[in-house]
């Protein structure tokens, strides 16, 4: 049995490959100037710090041929999937659908809506476009996970207390064993990130576990390296 050293207690890694990496919204809209995050008045440079760590995890999952799911938050060009409450919230100068420096803000297919180049999905990797904060809301994520019999989710991405936390709570309610990687998630508000980590692992892991990327990668190596080697031989 391999365990990831985690809080509030060790997280058991399944041997049978029922684990997936979930990368939430690592898109230009949130990480680069001129996108949605910037339009809402945030310092987007804060989020850049986790890019190398998310990439390390992505590469580990690719090495061991484990499934990877990425999400992007975005809307149809006619905004038919964007409720007025979301459209008007924030009273920012540039709102969803307006033309910004990276194309129309938070609109699917626009330059700003793309996943950052460092984490560009490979052919065959799944990208889920989601209109809400949670990745299970109006998407096929749950059925795709069930199809692959995935039970364990290693969760990363931005922003910790918004789309990441919402998704993790949705996943937890659906019975998935979720672990949030502490140094592979970030917020525009450091205190919100810290509080979210604490909320998730409080009360015996009421929403799930948290751990450092290094612990996850070590455990993946112990669990899957032999399998990956025997498959390539
Ligand atoms: C936000 C997200 N913050 N991906 N989206 O609006 O967290």
Image (cartoon, rainbow, N blue to C red):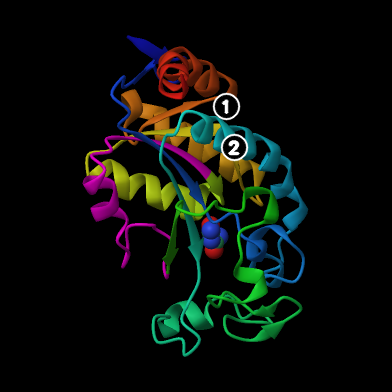
153 part of magenta stretch: yes
Q: Position of residue 111 (x, y in %)?
A: 66, 73
Give the crowd class for mark 2: few <14, some 14-19, many >=20 residues within 10 Å: many
Could you say whether the residue bearing mark 2 is in a helix, strand or loop? strand
Q: Which residue is more in the foreground, 207 or 99? A: 99
Residue carrying label 2: 184
Q: Which residue is more in the foreground, 185 or 103? A: 103
> Residue most toward the bottom?
78
In space, the residues marked 2 and 1 are separated at their CA atoms by: 7 Å
- The reply to whether discs 2 and 1 touch (Cβ–Cβ < 8 Å) is yes
Ligand 1, seen in the image, is in the quarter at: bottom right
Name the residue rendered at 65%, 34% in the picture.
53
Give the crowd class for mark 1: few <14, some 14-19, many >=20 residues within 10 Å: many
Eyeballing the image, is 125 above or below 183? below
Name the residue rendered at 46%, 40% in the picture.
155
Magenta residues (range)? 131-156
Task: Please tell me which of labels 2 and 1 falls first in the chain.
Answer: 2
Quarter residue 14 falls in: top left
Could you say whether the residue bearing mark 1 is in a helix, strand or loop? helix
Q: Position of residue 95 (x, y in %)?
A: 61, 81
136 part of magenta stretch: yes
Q: Which mark is residue 213?
A: 1
Ligand 1 within 8 Å of the CB at mark 2: no
Q: Which residue is more in the foreground, 54 or 180? A: 54
């Amino acid at each position: 049995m391999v365990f990831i050293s985690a809080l509030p207690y060790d997280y058991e890694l399944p041997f049978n490959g029922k684990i997936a990496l979930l990368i939430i919204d690592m898109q230009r809209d949130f990480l680069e100037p001129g996108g949605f995050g910037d339009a809402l008045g945030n310092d987007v440079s804060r989020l850049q710090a986790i890019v190398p760590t998310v990439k390390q995890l992505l590469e580990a999952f690719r090495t061991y041929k484990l499934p990877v799911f990425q999400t992007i938050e975005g809307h149809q060009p006619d905004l038919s999937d964007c409720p007025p409450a979301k459209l008007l919230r924030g009273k920012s100068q540039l709102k969803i659908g307006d033309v910004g420096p990276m194309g129309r803000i938070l609109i699917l297919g626009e330059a700003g809506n793309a996943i950052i180049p460092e984490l560009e999905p490979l052919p065959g990797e799944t990208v889920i476009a989601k209109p809400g904060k949670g990745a299970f809301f109006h998407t096929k994520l749950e059925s795709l996970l069930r199809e692959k019999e995935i039970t364990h989710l290693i969760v990363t991405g931005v922003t910790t207390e918004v789309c990441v936390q919402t998704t993790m709570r949705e996943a937890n309610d659906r019975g998935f064993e979720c672990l949030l990687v502490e140094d592979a998630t970030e917020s525009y508000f450091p205190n919100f990130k810290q509080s979210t980590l604490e909320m998730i692992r409080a009360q015996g892991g009421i929403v799930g576990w948290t751990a450092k990327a290094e612990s996850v990668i070590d455990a993946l190596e112990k669990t899957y390296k032999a399998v990956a080697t025997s498959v390539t031989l």
